[in-house]
Amino acid sequence: MKFQVVIEEDLEDGGYIVHCPALKGCWSQGDTIEEALDNIKEAIVGYLKTLNERAMRDAKSTDKALIKEVAVV
């Protein structure tokens, strides 16, 4: 799976900040571009793992749900 990322020089603290626009809130940083890219890869993996865990948990919770049809006049 491939994701586009945006890398910007961190003018305040030095190094680089990087984020993945496709994954809201998925940010990382590094002292070099290479380090920033390695770090965003790890952040993306963690983000996707969390999404998957939430989806599995939500899928399990629907077992207790009932679906009924009601008529509204």
Image: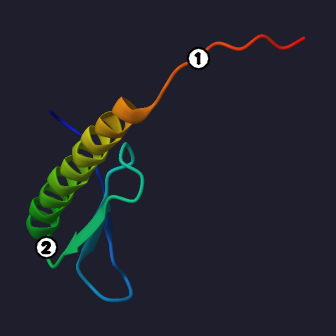
Question: Which residue matches tag 1?
Answer: 68
Q: Nearer the viewer, residue 24 or 10?
A: 24
User: Measured along the vertical axis of the image, is residue 49 above or below residue 13?
Assistant: above
Q: Position of residue 71 (x, y in %)?
A: 78, 10
Quadrant in which the N terminus is drawn: top left
- Kindly identify the residue that appears in the image at 12 percent across and 59 percent down: 42
Q: CA distance from mark 1 to mark 2?
A: 56 Å
Q: Which mark is residue 32?
A: 2
Q: Position of residue 21 (x, y in %)?
A: 39, 48
Q: Position of residue 44 (x, y in %)?
A: 21, 52
Q: Nearer the viewer, mark 1 or mark 2?
A: 1
Q: Nearer the viewer, residue 65 or 27?
A: 65
Label 1 SS: loop
- Kindly identify the residue that appears in the image at 52 percent across and 20 percent down: 67
- Kindly identify the residue that appears in the image at 25 percent across and 73 percent down: 16
Q: Say which amino acid is labelled 2.
A: Thr
Q: Say which amino acid is labelled 1.
A: Lys
